[in-house]
Image: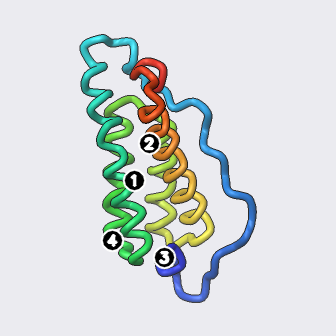
Amino acid sequence: TIAALLPPGEGLIAGPRPAPAADLCSNLAENPRFVPHLRSYLEGLPSVRDDLTVALAKGQREVVRNIVHRLHGTAANFGFPTISDVARNCEAALSRGDGLETITGLTTLTQLLTAAIAGQKNDQTVTELI
């Protein structure tokens, strides 16, 4: 569970879940040569989200940190600054042991991934999603 990732003595704080940013846009979407790569990246997000969910459920802190680190880099490389920024902040919170910021970051990151996946499942074209 997420609680297993918190430093000793910190608990979960109840409150509203942060809403993901409405703009899941790639800076590279207007480059027709890059669209197939963006589509492939988006198609791989369900696996990434599922791996993150499993690692969270098992309390695998290092696995979570590695997934978040990879998301930080790959999202930046594929022109998704919102996902990259949230992953970067989450990675930093994990490193500092900041429980509240880690929970907020992981929740937002999961929501962003879910929104991107939902866009694909709803048959949006890649340019609408990115």
| Foreground of the two, 110 or 88 | 110
Q: Secondary structure at mark 1?
A: helix
Q: Residue type at mark 1?
A: Arg
C-alpha distance separating marks 4 and 2 = 19 Å
Real-space Cα distance between discs 1 and 2? 14 Å
Compared with 95, 29 (above or below) is above
From this view, report whether residue 49 is shown above or below residue 103.
Answer: above
Q: Position of residue 100 (x, y in %)?
A: 62, 68
Residue designated by label 1: 49
In the image, what residue type sits under mark 2?
Answer: Ser
Residue carrying label 3: 1
- The residue positioned 39% from the left and 29% from the top of the image is 79
Residue 61: x, y in percent?
A: 38, 73
Q: Look at mark 2 in the image and give the residue it sits on.
A: 84
Which quadrant would residue 22 be assigned to in this image? top right
Measured Cα–Cα span from mark 3 to mark 4: 13 Å
The answer to whether 99 appears left or right of 28 in the picture is: right
Residue at the spot x=43%, y=73% of the render?
Answer: 57
Label 2: how many residues lie within 10 Å, few (<14), some (14-19) or many (20+)?
A: many
Quarter the C terminus occupies: top left
In front: mark 3 or mark 2? 3
Q: Is 29 placed above or below 23 here?
A: above
Spatial separation of the CA atoms under disc 3 and disc 2:
23 Å
Question: Real-space Cα distance between discs 4 and 1?
Answer: 16 Å
Query: Farthest front residue?
Result: 122
Q: Amino acid at mark 4?
A: Glu
With 117 as the anchor, is 48 left or right in this view? left
Where is mark 4, residue-wise? 62
Mark 4 or mark 1: whose residue is earlier in sequence = 1
